[in-house]
Image (tube, rainbow, N blue to C red):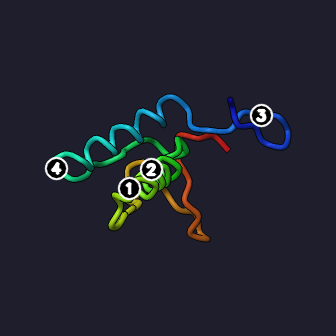
């Protein structure tokens, strides 16, 4: 059964986001104990990280979760107000 929002649109992770969640879960359980999720802006890194946290929490395997966002200075810029924008996305 697909979950839908109030307007009838499907809600959930996209295939590549599910792949990222699985990648992190597998690597968290490996001797490396973690991994990096490095996608372009706007592709859902935050929701993937929260999904990993929820899965591990549901299985009582989460002692802590560290999520850190590090902007790539080559891809981002700020305007006079400090708002971050991607130079490759037209306004």
Callout 4: 10 Å neighbours few (<14), some, many (20+)?
Answer: few
Gap in angstroms between the C-alphas marked 2 and 1: 32 Å
Query: Which residue position is annotated with label 1?
Result: 73
Task: Give the structural element (helix, strand or loop) at label 1.
Answer: loop
Gap in angstroms between the C-alphas marked 2 and 4: 19 Å
Task: Give the structural element (helix, strand or loop) at label 3.
Answer: loop
Is residue 51 found left or right of 9 in the rendered image? left
Q: Position of residue 82 (x, y in %)?
A: 56, 69
Disc with the residue nearer the chain's start (4 vs 3): 3
Task: Give the structural element (helix, strand or loop) at label 4.
Answer: loop
Gap in angstroms between the C-alphas marked 3 and 2: 24 Å
Disc with the residue nearer the chain's start (1 vs 3): 3
Q: Nearer the viewer, mark 1 or mark 3?
A: 3
Query: Which residue position is annotated with label 3?
Result: 9
The numbered mark at residue 37 is none
Gap in angstroms between the C-alphas marked 1 and 3: 35 Å
Q: Position of residue 87 (x, y in %)?
A: 52, 46
**Residue 24 sits in quarter:** top left
Is residue 69 found left or right of 91 in the rendered image? left
Residue found at x 53% / y 45%:
44
Gap in angstroms between the C-alphas marked 1 and 4: 27 Å
Q: Nearer the viewer, mark 2 or mark 1?
A: 2
Q: Position of residue 1 (x, y in %)?
A: 68, 29
Callout 2: 10 Å neighbours few (<14), some, many (20+)?
Answer: some
User: Which of these two is toward me, 36 or 91?
Assistant: 36
Disc with the residue nearer the chain's start (1 vs 4): 4
Callout 3: 10 Å neighbours few (<14), some, many (20+)?
Answer: few
Query: Which residue position is annotated with label 2?
Result: 55
Query: Which residue position is annotated with label 4?
Result: 32
């Amino acid at each position: 059964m697909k979950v839908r929002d109030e307007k009838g649109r499907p809600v959930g992770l996209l295939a590549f986001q599910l792949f990222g969640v699985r990648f992190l879960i597998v690597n968290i359980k490996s001797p490396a104990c973690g991994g990096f999720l490095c996608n372009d802006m706007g592709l859902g890194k935050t929701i993937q990280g929260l999904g990993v946290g929820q899965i591990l929490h549901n299985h009582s395997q989460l002692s802590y979760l560290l999520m850190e966002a590090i902007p790539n200075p080559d891809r981002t810029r700020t305007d006079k107000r400090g708002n971050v924008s991607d130079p490759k996305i037209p306004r």
